[in-house]
Image (tube, rainbow, N blue to C red):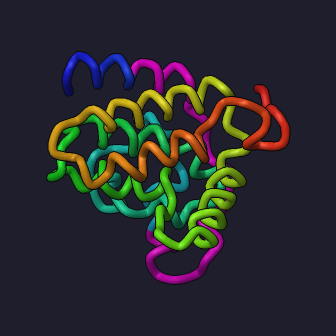
Amino acid sequence: MTPTSRKVWEQIAAAFSPILPPQPITTCECEECLDVRANLGHLRWNDVLLPAIEKHFGSLPLLTDDAFQALLPAFLFRALDDISAENKFLEWTLYAVCGAYEEDEATTEAADADRRRRIARFTRQQRESVRAFLALVTVAPNLDIHHAPVAHALAAIWTLGNSAYGIEVSR
């Protein structure tokens, strides 16, 4: 982790309290979701061990909104470990927090609305910490493929004002 990544990580760690996610952490009964529940459902983000996070690197979309909020820092920490195109955690975490950035305007608007609904209960400090993570990605070399979707997510999803969320949620 670079000094800049470490600073972003410290901001994330300060923003997200280590709480147990409400159960169940997934709503589907498929084998993959049951496995996610078994491996992550009883953990706070700061309890998630490397083998569990390695096994579930692409599982953020499967989580309920509350579990997403409770466990996101574990995924962000692993993504910050190596901000490069080779880091599968970075790639899959970006997909989960940025949504579908498509050519089709209707699809993009629907995906943005879904992400805004998903993070509506995030505190301002939590949104600011995710914004810091995304801003770090926008200046990372060799991640050009992610720059436009991340810039879009910063402008359309991870805004800090009331207009994107309808209300300002504070905790």
User: Residue at left 55%, top 31%?
Assistant: 18
Q: Residue furthest bottom?
A: 30
> Would residue 96 appear left or right of 57 to someone viewing this image?
right
Task: Look at the image and give the residue range highlighted in magenta.
Answer: 10-35
> Would residue 49 appear left or right of 142 to someone viewing this image?
right
* Residue 45 percent location from the top left of the image: 48, 39
Asked if the stretch drawn in magenta spans residue 152, the answer is: no
User: Residue at left 83%, top 43%?
Assistant: 166
Q: Quick check: 162 above or below 51?
A: above
* Residue 134 percent location from the top left of the image: 41, 37
* Residue 89 percent location from the top left of the image: 30, 51
Q: Residue furthest right?
A: 167
User: Residue at left 72%, top 44%?
Assistant: 120
Asked if the stretch drawn in magenta spans residue 31, the answer is: yes
Residue 25 appears in view: no
Q: Quick check: 117 above or below 5?
A: below
Quadrant where the image shows the C terminus = top right
Q: 151 or 137: which is nearer to us?
A: 151
Q: 1 or 106: which is nearer to us?
A: 106
Quadrant where the image shows the N terminus = top left
User: Residue at left 51%, top 47%?
Assistant: 153
Residue 103 appears in view: yes
* Residue 20 percent location from the top left of the image: 61, 42
Q: 122 or 18: which is nearer to us?
A: 122
Where residue 9 sits, quadrant-wise, is top left
